[in-house]
């Protein structure tokens, strides 16, 4: 008897969620964690009654007919006020009126889902988030990106977690996502220590809940001090010396971890799970690493997912490191391909936007996070005009604080109206809806399979309560979904042709047991790790505040972007009224 390291979160016999992870004995050797092992022997017999749920990672064989729904095939497509969708082998096999009884449709093995009181639409794709932030939802307030980073990711107090804690942390976000109508998550899983258990835990959570996920192997091979502007003359010498000891892991380590994650997980769970490349930001990555990631992405048809020009600090850093706008530098080194996605991209100049349009690179838009961190307002009207594919995201769950796509939808539509008085340039609800579906699918390079309801595409479908107060009376459903409805209206969700939430009940896990286990782990984290992290961050606060003010008073080429005056004024101005005096 060998030890099977595929830690199944549920008892294979009764499907009850296991509360304490232990190595599981089995009769065979199971090298792939995605293989559902039927030979698990528990230390003691499971005391829960047998439940009828779908074993993790296994697709239902049954066909499903979603009947008589109000079908919205895509953001800007004609709606079908009463139509059926036939789902077979995980894909959409037919869309039409009164399909039941048509040749080959009916009989045993066909599950009917009554959608007569439902809107039926493509599942949302969350283009950018970080599930590793889920134990700090709502914890931080009124901190700009750089100061918040020091608190959430303190270099001298990074928490070390067990694989099960990583699993539970991602599970919160995955469940919130599902309940918000998200069927695919692009999870930029920040993992500075390069711990394989972090990746395995996160991937297993998506596998078990039944979601589709593209998960990054996060990478950064530049030492912490390297890209910091003015560190030498502004930091206390002792703190400067301490920061100099924070060394990044070498390039080869990052690439090796990516290969390990890719081999183990990419294409597993019936191809629901993808492993993508996540250089965290050009300022934290050598050009060699950016280029290596680009090469791999082109060879394998996967995306490179990188924070770029999120805050003004990044624009200042680019000026100092490269002596030119960042996007121009990325183009110089060959990184700006259609496989490349810039996350946030708030501080862009006009030529950079034009360049993105020419190269076909994508961006993710995370309005709530940008507003909460005071990072600025992305130039969405200009990016739309340049034809840059835009995916809507929530960003991590400690800067947007909930993986709720409905909040993102509303903000993506309304935020860009401030400061733009030509209302014909305003993004509409349809634009926001497209960002949350086709646009986000494009950033994940999954546009051929998901993002719309079309015959042949994967059956990632959500059913929304048509009797929700926000949909009474039903007149312009996409606008109502954007402005008048929240996540509670999402009733039933299919991913890969499998019903993973039915009338708001999760079908793949025992949610109650899972929630109890999550709560225990999260409270433990709050007690054990957060005080240490906060303590470690504190000495740096005054210095980071000074950096922030100096950045605010520094002119960069994109200076005029976030505060766009109706007169077209491009005069560089300090981004605060608080004076900054060096030294
Ligand atoms: Zn992010």
Image (spheres, helix red, strand yellow):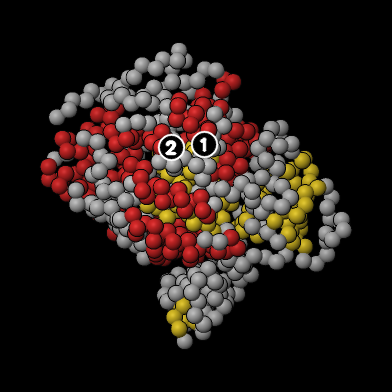
Mark 1 sits on what residue? 359
In the rendered image, residue 57, in percent from the top left (x then y), is placed at 58, 66
Residue 138, label in figure: none
Q: Relative to 492, is 45 on the left or the right?
A: left
Q: Residue furthest bottom?
A: 1
Mark 1 → mark 2, Cα distance in angstroms: 9 Å
In the displayed structure, would residue 25 be above or below residue 123?
below
Secondary structure state at the residue bearing disc 2? helix
In the rendered image, residue 262, in percent from the top left (x then y), is placed at 48, 61
Asked whether residue 210 appears in the rendered view, the answer is no
Q: Nearer the viewer, residue 275 or 168?
A: 275
In the rendered image, residue 261, in percent from the top left (x then y), is placed at 45, 62
The yes-or-no answer for disc 1 within 8 Å of ligand 1 is no
Who comes first in sequence, dot 1 or dot 2? 2
Q: Relative to 80, is 409 on the left or the right?
A: left
Q: Relative to 349, is 539 on the left or the right?
A: left
Q: Nearer the viewer, residue 195 or 423?
A: 195
Mark 2 sits on what residue? 331
The yes-or-no answer for disc 2 within 8 Å of ligand 1 is no
Q: Residue furthest left?
A: 237
In the displayed structure, would residue 256 be above or below residue 354?
below
Image quarter hosting the C terminus? top left
Crowding around mark 1 (Cα neighbors within 10 Å: few <14, some 14 to 19, many 20+) is: some
Q: Say how many tags the image has.
A: 2
Residue drawn at x 54%, y 29% is: 386
Residue drawn at x 73%, y 43% is: 71
Secondary structure state at the residue bearing disc 1? helix
In the rendered structure, are the residues bearing label 1 and label 2 in contact, judged by CB atoms less than 8 Å apart?
yes
Q: Residue furthest top?
A: 567
């Amino acid at each position: 008897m060998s030890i099977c390291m595929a830690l199944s979160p549920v008892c294979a016999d009764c499907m009850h969620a296991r509360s304490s992870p232990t190595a599981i004995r089995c009769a065979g050797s199971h090298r792939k964690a995605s293989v559902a092992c039927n030979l698990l022997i528990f230390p003691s017999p499971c005391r829960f009654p047998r439940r009828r749920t779908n074993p993790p990672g296994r697709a239902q064989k049954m066909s499903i007919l979603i009947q008589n729904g109000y079908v919205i095939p895509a953001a800007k497509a004609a709606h079908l006020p009463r139509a059926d969708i036939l789902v077979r082998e995980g894909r959409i096999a037919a869309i039409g009126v009164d399909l039941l009884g048509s040749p080959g449709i009916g009989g045993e093995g066909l599950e009917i889902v009554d959608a007569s009181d439902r809107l039926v639409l493509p599942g949302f794709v969350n283009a950018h988030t970080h599930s590793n932030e889920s134990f700090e939802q709502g914890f931080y307030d009124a901190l700009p990106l750089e100061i918040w980073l020091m608190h959430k990711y303190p270099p001298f107090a990074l928490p070390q977690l067990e694989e099960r804690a990583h699993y539970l942390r991602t599970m919160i976000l995955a469940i919130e996502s599902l309940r918000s109508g998200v069927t695919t998550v692009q999870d930029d899983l920040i993992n500075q220590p390069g711990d394989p258990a972090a990746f395995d835990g996160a991937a297993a959570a998506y596998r078990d809940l039944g979601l589709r996920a593209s998960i990054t192997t996060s990478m950064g091979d530049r030492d912490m001090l390297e890209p910091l502007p003015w560190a030498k003359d502004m930091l206390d010498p002792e703190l400067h010396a301490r920061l100099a000891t924070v060394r990044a892991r070498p390039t080869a380590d990052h690439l090796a971890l990516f290969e390990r994650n890719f081999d183990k997980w990419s294409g597993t769970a019936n191809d629901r799970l993808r492993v993508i490349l996540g250089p965290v930001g050009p300022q934290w990555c050598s050009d060699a690493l950016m280029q290596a990631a680009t090469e791999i992405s082109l060879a394998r048809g996967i995306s490179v997912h990188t924070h770029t020009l999120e805050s003004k600090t990044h624009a200042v850093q680019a000026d100092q490191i490269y002596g030119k706008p960042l996007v121009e530098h990325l183009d110089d080194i060959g990184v700006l391909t259609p496989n490349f996605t810039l996350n946030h991209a708030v501080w862009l100049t006009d030529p950079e936007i034009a360049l993105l349009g020419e190269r076909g690179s994508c961006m993710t838009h995370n309005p709530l996070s940008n507003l909460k961190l005071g990072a600025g307002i992305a130039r969405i009207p200009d990016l739309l005009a340049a034809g840059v594919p835009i995916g809507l995201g929530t960003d991590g769950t400690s800067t947007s604080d909930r993986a709720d796509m409905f909040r993102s939808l509303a903000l993506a539509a309304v935020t860009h109206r401030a400061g733009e008085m030509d209302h014909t340039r305003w993004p509409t609800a349809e634009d926001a809806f497209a960002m949350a579906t086709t646009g986000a699918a494009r950033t994940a390079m999954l546009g051929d399979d998901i993002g719309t309801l079309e015959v042949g595409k994967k059956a990632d479908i959500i059913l929304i309560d048509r009797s929700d107060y926000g949909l009474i009376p039903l007149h312009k459903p996409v606008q109502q979904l954007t402005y008048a409805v929240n996540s509670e209206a999402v009733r039933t969700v299919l991913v890969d042709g499998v019903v993973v939430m039915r009338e708001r009940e999760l079908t793949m896990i025992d949610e109650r047991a899972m929630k109890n286990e999550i709560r225990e782990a999260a409270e433990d984290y709050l007690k054990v790790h957060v005080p240490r992290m906060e303590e470690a961050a504190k000495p740096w606060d005054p210095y980071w505040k000074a950096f922030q003010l100096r950045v605010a008073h520094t002119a960069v080429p994109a200076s005029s972007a976030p505060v766009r005056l109706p007169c077209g004024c491009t005069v560089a101005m300090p981004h605060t009224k608080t004076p900054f005096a060096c030294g």
